[in-house]
Image: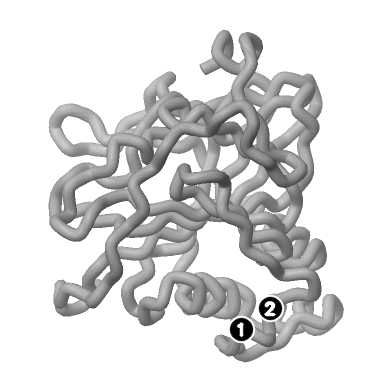
Amino acid sequence: MALRIRKYLATKGIPNVPAPPIWQFPEGFSVHSIGQTGVRVVDNFLSKEEARALIDLYGLTVVRSTVIGPGGQSVIHDYRTSSNAYVSIDSSPLIKLITYRAATLFGLPVSHAETFSLTRYQYGEYYKGHFDHDGSMKADRLYTLLVYLNDLTPEEGGGTCFEKLNLVAQPVCGRAVVWNNSDLSRVRLPESYHSALPVLKEGAEKWVAQLWFRSYRQSSAQPAARSAPVTGVPLAVSTPLPLGVYLPDNLTIEHR
């Protein structure tokens, strides 16, 4: 498996060793703050070739997504109807490369990253409003990085909606959306509440990769130094927005 992955990546011109320096990011890499929301979009976090490689390598491994039930067990529930796969960070050079990039953005060691996740949403599938941080040390997810692996138009749906921030990010291939989940005391930020809107066009799919970074090392639970997060303020109508980011409309609200 490892040899097959290395050969595949070589055909795409993707390095077979981790490359953490920021100058190794894809051409056109740029970070944009979305008003005063605290949410940022990172354009060209992945190249289109890297995004396609993730789907080709791991897309067939996805299974129905679960949620945590009342007893703490993972259960299938109609609150979340996507399919996903969890991939070890050491499973391939490409996953390592992406994790190093994310760690560079957040200023945290790679050891603070959780397992890499790949998710597919097909027609009609969604993930209703939720938090990535449950307020406990068990899931102390300080940062979330969500990167889109394909494009979808607003008519095709599949946007990421931060309803408390009046913000929707539409899938743009290679773009990452990043945000803070908690403050310095590990208190959950209410504005981090978000949902994956349904895919609205039959035959369309939405692919995303996710990484979560904790404030402590996975092995030692040693807290990391971190700066204070920005308290999110909802978008105003007059806020200049990058392409693919917009304010919710009635159709978006109807499909939450």
User: In the shown orientation, is residue 164 left or right of residue 15?
Assistant: left
Q: Residues within 10 Å of mark 2 (few under 14, many from 20)?
A: some
User: In the shown orientation, is residue 176 left or right of residue 85?
Assistant: right
Amino acid type at mark 2: Phe
Which residue occupies 57% across, 47% down?
34
Residue matched to label 2: 25
Residue matched to label 1: 22
Place of residue 91 in the rendered image (x, y in percent of width and height, measured from the top left): 52, 75
Figure quadrant of residue 14: bottom right
Place of residue 199 in the rendered image (x, y in percent of width and height, measured from the top left): 67, 25
Figure quadrant of residue 203: top right
Which residue occupies 46% across, 26% down?
163
Circle 1 SS class: helix
Regarding residue 117, the answer to whether it shows in the image is no
Circle 2 SS class: loop
15 in relation to 204, above or below: below
User: In the shown orientation, is residue 189 left or right of residue 167?
Assistant: left
220 in relation to 181, above or below: below
Figure quadrant of residue 134: top left
Place of residue 250 in the rendered image (x, y in percent of width and height, measured from the top left): 62, 10
Is the C-beta separation of discs 2 and 1 under 8 Å? Answer: yes
